[in-house]
Amino acid sequence: QVQLVESGGGLVQAGDSLRLSCAASGRTFSGYAMGWFRQAPGKEREFVAAIRGSGGSTYFADSVKGRFTISRDNARNMVYLQMNSLKPEDTAVYYCAARQRVAVSSLLHEYDFWGQGTQVTVSS
């Protein structure tokens, strides 16, 4: 069982940056691929970014490519989402998720554990 706790959300203006953090429990953190997803009001949850268990490869949604980066610190059981050049359409609840495989995935159903989410609001 893995427990995930997100932090770092908030209200920012368009063009600003935010860094989200996700703290994970468990002793085999490097054995999990980690992902970030988001859900805007009235919309389905969508993939944002993912990182391999070792941190060696990453994968991004086209909508955030070039603006967001994902990283992890396996020694601290942490994963981060650095969000730059934020846009109003990035407004959503952001969720951290863990997959019991080292390979990355963009598919919601392939993730086994989820955090409670953190709100990100970008004003224009």
Image (cartoon, rainbow, N blue to C red):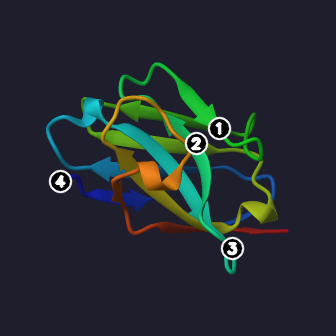
Image mark count: 4
**Residue that carries the numbered disc 4 in the rendered image:** 1
**Residue that carries the numbered disc 2 in the rendered image:** 49
Q: Residues within 10 Å of mark 4 (few under 14, many from 20)?
A: few
Q: Looking at the image, is mark 3 or mark 1 earlier in the sequence?
A: 3
Q: Looking at the image, is mark 1 or mark 4 earlier in the sequence?
A: 4
Three-letter code for the amino acid on which mark 2 is drawn: Ala
Mark 4 and mark 3 in contact? Answer it, CB < 8 Å. no
Mark 3 and mark 2 in contact? Answer it, CB < 8 Å. no
Q: Distance of mark 3 from mark 2, alpha carbons?
A: 18 Å
The secondary element bearing badge 3 is classed as loop
User: Toward the viewer: 62 or 85?
Assistant: 62
Mark 1 and mark 4 in contact? Answer it, CB < 8 Å. no
Three-letter code for the amino acid on which mark 1 is drawn: Phe
The image quarter in which residue 99 lies = top left
Residue 64 pos. (x, y %): 73, 44
Three-letter code for the amino acid on which mark 3 is drawn: Lys
Q: Looking at the image, is mark 4 or mark 2 earlier in the sequence?
A: 4
**Residue that carries the numbered disc 3 in the rendered image:** 43
